[in-house]
Amino acid sequence: MFTHSSSLVTLSLLAMSSWLAFASAVGPVMNQQPTIFDLIQNDPDLSEFFNLISRNELVPTLLKFRQATVFAPNNEAMRAFTGQKDQDLLLYHLANVALTTDKLDQSVSSELPGNPPLWIARRDASSYQYDLYINDARVIRGDIKAMSTRQDEQVLHVIDKVLEPIMTSARDPQLSNPDAARLLERAGSFNLGPYQISDFVQQVTSHKKLSVFATPGRHTFLIPINRGFEAVSRDKIDPKVIDGHIVPNVALFSRPAIRGRPVQTLAFSDNLKVTISFSNESLPSQEIGSRIYVQSNTLVGDFHHPRGVVVAQVVKANIPVRNGVVHLIDKPLIVIDIDIVNFLKSFKVFEQRNGILYEFYRIMKDFATNFMEGITGAGELTLLAPSNEAFRKLGEKNLNALLANQQKLTEILQLHVIRRRLSSDEIIQNPLLSHVESADRHRRLYFSAFGPDDNITVSVEGGGVNATIIQPDIGALNGIVHIIDRVLGVPTMTVIEKLQSDPIMSKTHALAIQDDFLGRMQAYRDPYNPRIQQKFTMLVPSDDAWEVIHRTMGSAFKKLFMGEYSYNVRQILERHLVVGQELSINNLTSQGRDNYLQTIRGKVKIVFVENGGEYFAEWENIRARVVRPDVQCIDGVIHVIDHVLVQRREISVSGSERFTVNALLLLAITLTAIFWNARALQH
């Protein structure tokens, strides 16, 4: 069946091309422009694609004698493509009309038998430009015009990826250009690699939802593979869950899909609101590309569909169908049916394709089994889970040192655990929730939320490390998981780098730039080993602390930050800095009330006290709360305080005004003296 039908198509196209060749031979020769065949032949960056064309009998004739649009993969794309390179692949890159980029609408029919569509997407690259995508390939050079020998318009677009059509395992022509429903029905006939989807198909069929997958238009279908049902009860896959795997009216190929932007699914009504979004994880340097993830977010739920995020890895992306695009994912979305530890286990998808949190799980399993057992039976909790990339940021040396120290490792892991549910909404909506206790009882976690209302970023600081929550609110039976981009408690920054990067310290950093204060800090070296920088203890006023100065001494505040009081700024910062010692909050509070702190400004009587679990620094008549104690850095420790240790007399503008008055008085006295001296000389 396949051979006969395919031959008919090929013979008919060959007959047409032969007629065109004959007509061209006998007709007038009017063509003065190169054909699209000539353009491809003469473009060195399209030589791989041209070699494939030149080995084919049909396609060269089509490119010489008739109207056409060609989406030509460049050499890099052709070399990266590992699929079958044949006539069908060539025809999938051709359309029989000439279309410039401004005429490319939502789709264009290809010349592959069955005329499957190529899907068009535009993604803003800047305020004035956009990237154009054909399926998952980006147009890198477009609107290159040519003319057939019969004076038909032709257009060439160069793309950076090969367009891969959906193919049947036996090249069955009756299955050409299938919609998503047909793909589900005959999944075994299509080349889906090692993946099977029969479990999901069974649920779709039993709930009479197959017709939804046949809906005309351009949609996105997320299909879980069988392996994903090993940890999910099949009876939880109901019609609403199935709807949550379909994004209507948009074909989201992986590259043009905007990362982190939620889009509504079919499961979006008054009683249940589910969105999905895409994200990426960069691979280690020895690997190529990135892993793609899709996450569902149940914004409004019910008893059977609790609120929360479910993350799945896309294991086979960008399968084009007649009514959109299909992505195979490693587990069902929406369904929250496993605890936190089993959620982490699920990220080891395949032996060579570890998920975004597998490194965290591997470390728990191989080096901290007691910790893993502890969170398994700990009840409700929140886990701040570092991504694989977060562990790579530590560097091999730091990571190995951490793994070799069992006690330190356990403390670090405990720092990532909160013994209650804490959603991102609670953090964002409760500005008074500045800190929470971690499972490591000696240390707290400090949260902050910033950014516009439609794109709020939540960060957490723990043990001197600031991390951003890159994927919040992943639901589990016993709590919530937030994926973060750094490992807490393992500092990788110096005190200066911490000042530069932490948003709560930005104003102190802005002042420290004045008069090269940071440069002088870097110059402090160990007297016994000049190659080693000395340790620091720094009391850093928070941005809110400087706002107090702004409210109470507005003119002085302005002059401080304009650089007019650089000498005063240096004096103030020197009072907040100890060189040669790394003093924890426990060290400071244990020194008593009669102790003086040796700052680079000299000995200063700053008393540290603890009261009800809070720490305070007392200097003269100022009592500053330590809002973040023990912010660890590579070369010391920072304690963030909520008041600046400064007196009004040190920066008051009235001092300047007194200087002006005194100067005028001195001038008056001088002039008076000159006057009387002159009179005395006259007499």
Image (cartoon, rainbow, N blue to C red):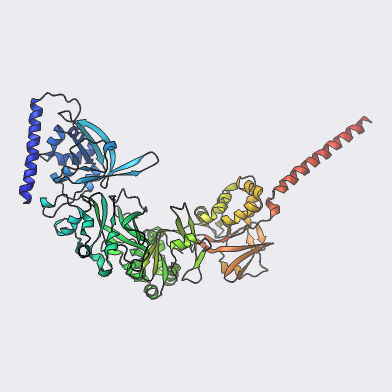
- In the foreground, 581 or 459: 459
The residue under the point 34% across, 64% down is: 359
Classify 179 as above or below 604: above
Classify 439 as above or below 187: below
Classify 315 as above or below 24: below
The residue under the point 73% across, 45% down is: 657
The residue under the point 46% across, 58% down is: 459
Classify 387 as above or below 157: below
- Going by the image, does 373 lie left or right of 185? right
Residue 463: tell me if it is visible.
Answer: yes
User: From the image, which quarter does the C terminus lie in?
Assistant: top right
On the image, the x and y values in percent for residue 387 come to 37, 61
The residue under the point 8% across, 38% down is: 14
Q: Quadrant of residue 225?
A: bottom left
On the image, the x and y values in percent for residue 573 come to 61, 54
Residue 171: tell me if it is visible.
Answer: no
**Furthest residue to the front?**
270
